[in-house]
Amino acid sequence: MWLDALRGLRRGELAGLRWVDISLETRELTVVQQLIHVTGQLRVVLPKSAASQRTIALDTETIRLRRRHQQRQHLSGLDSAGWVFTRADGQPIRPDYLTYRFRRSVAASGLPPVRLHDLRHGAASTALAAHVDLRMVQGELGHASIVLTSDTYTSVLPELHHEAAKATARLVLATARRTGHRLRKRTIQLRRRLANRPPR
């Protein structure tokens, strides 16, 4: 759920994730496939669209958690198939199992009901609140169009625009104050020099 909450992967992309898709050295994850459940069978298919095939940067905490998870899998002998998320027998998990596990976690936490897919929206909203560029968020989510990203998160954007306006004003005013202070200082120094100059 960590990857979903921070990087906004779809559940099929999470289920289809393999260790070869994650580089712990470069701290990147590449989405090249997803798992879907059709007529009682798991099938590996391409991601939802060409834009969904993407490379996502990972933070150091995510890398730390991935290393720990990989070590646990290795000790349990579950890493031979290469899947990141597996059942007890090492086989990949069904995407709907992620939904089931998430519902149980939310219910146990006592928090209001939240869907697994809401974590994807939360990841985008958090990135935008952190002033990540909209086009960068589009790439991370794998949206084919920036219009889709913008339209989906219009409720977040007005607040961010106001914050950006405040930040810009703060920068301009701080610069003006520094400039004004320097000008006043120079004026005072010039007046002192003129006052101390001997008469001609």
Image (tube, grey):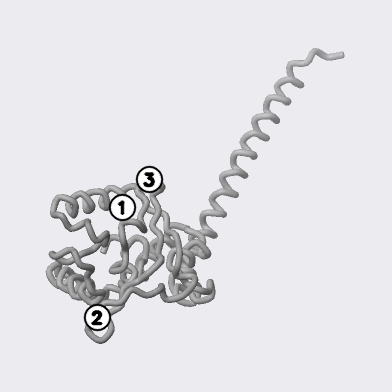
Please state the horizontal and vertical placement of residue 111, each as a whole percent of the image: 19, 70
Task: Check disc 3 and give the amino acid type.
Answer: Glu
Q: Earlier in the sequence, mark 3 or mark 1?
A: 3
Classify 125 as above or below 166: below
Please state the horizontal and vertical placement of residue 117, each as a whole percent of the image: 31, 74
Out of 157 and 55, give the one closest to the viewer.
55
Quadrant assignment for the N terminus: bottom left
Q: Earlier in the sequence, mark 1 or mark 2?
A: 2
Residue 41 has which mark? 2
Q: Which residue is mark 3?
A: 25
Q: Earlier in the sequence, mark 3 or mark 2?
A: 3
Quarter assignment of residue 82: bottom left
Q: CA distance from mark 1 to mark 2?
A: 30 Å
Q: Which residue is mark 1?
A: 62
Q: CA distance from mark 3 to mark 2?
A: 34 Å
Residue 184 has which mark? none
Mark 3 or 1, closer to the camera: 3
Q: CA distance from mark 3 to mark 1?
A: 12 Å
